[in-house]
Every structure is written in C-alpha cells, then in structure tokens.
C-alpha cells in the first residue's frame, strides 16, 4: 500500500482555495468523494463525478447514461486513476454550477 499526497484546488477561484490530503492508494473514488466533502466543508447535496481523460467515474444513471459511459466509483481505487506522480483527475461537484 502506498500513501498518496493529493493536492486539491478549486479552478478559477481567487484567492486560491486548496487542500492537501493524504490517502492510501487503495482509497476508492467513492471514499475520496466523501473525504473531499469533509475537507472542503461541503454537505454532499449535489451530484458529482470524476473525470480522467475521457473516462467518467461516479454513480451511473441508467435513465441518462449509456452503458459504460460512467464507471461506478465504488470499486475504482486511486492507484488506477492516479497511476503516476503528478497525474490529474477532475472532480466535478454540482452539475448545475460545474464546480
């Protein structure tokens, strides 16, 4: 198991708002979502997803998303989506405001 130090920053915000979080490589994206909510002081009241390259991870909506458009986040570990140092992942929280 490896410890990841993840730098989280909000885009297009002045002054910069950021957090540094340490997680294990076995943390799932679902767990990471919960940790982000706590670290940022948010209330988990909006939809969210993670985007890596062209792949989306989150909670698939069978009425909206096609097959395999969104991969369920509960079994995807950070080690898969952040495989190398300085890899990037986009976390979208609140689809209406897209932050």
Image (tube, grey):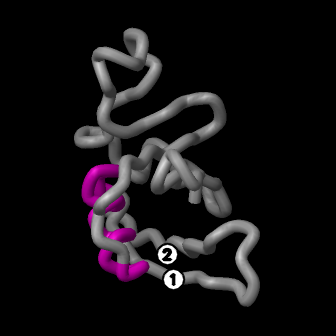
**Is tag 1's residue or tag 2's residue first in the polypeptide sequence?**
2
Residue ID for mark 2: 5
Can you say whether 93 is above or below 37 in the image?
Answer: above
On whether residue 40 falls in the magenta region, the answer is yes
As rendered, which of 20 and 98 lies closer to the eye? 98
* Element class at badge 2: strand
Point 38% across, 66% down: residue: 2
Q: Are marks 1 and 2 in contact (CB under 8 Å)?
A: yes
Query: Is 1 on the left or on the right of 18, as rendered?
Result: left
Relative to 38, 81 lies left or right = right
Q: Of 80 and 49, which appears nearest the observer?
A: 49
The quarter of the picture where the C terminus appears is: bottom right
Which mark is on residue 20?
Answer: 1
Q: Quadrant of residue 3?
A: bottom left
Mark 1–mark 2 distance (CA, rounded to whole Å):
7 Å
- Is 42 rendered above or below residue 47? below
Closer to the camera in the image, 51 or 76: 51
Residue at (31% x, 77% y) in the render? 38
Give, as a single range, the part of the protein colored magenta. 26-41
């Amino acid at each position: 198991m490896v410890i990841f130090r993840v730098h989280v920053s909000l885009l297009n915000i002045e002054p910069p708002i950021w957090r540094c979080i340490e997680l294990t490589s076995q943390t799932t994206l679902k767990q990471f979502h919960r940790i982000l909510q706590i670290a940022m002081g948010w209330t988990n009241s909006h939809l969210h997803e993670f985007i890596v390259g062209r792949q989306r991870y989150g909670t698939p909506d069978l009425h909206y998303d096609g097959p395999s458009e969104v991969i369920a986040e509960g079994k995807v570990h950070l080690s898969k989506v952040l495989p190398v140092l300085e890899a990037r992942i986009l976390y979208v929280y609140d689809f209406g405001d897209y932050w």
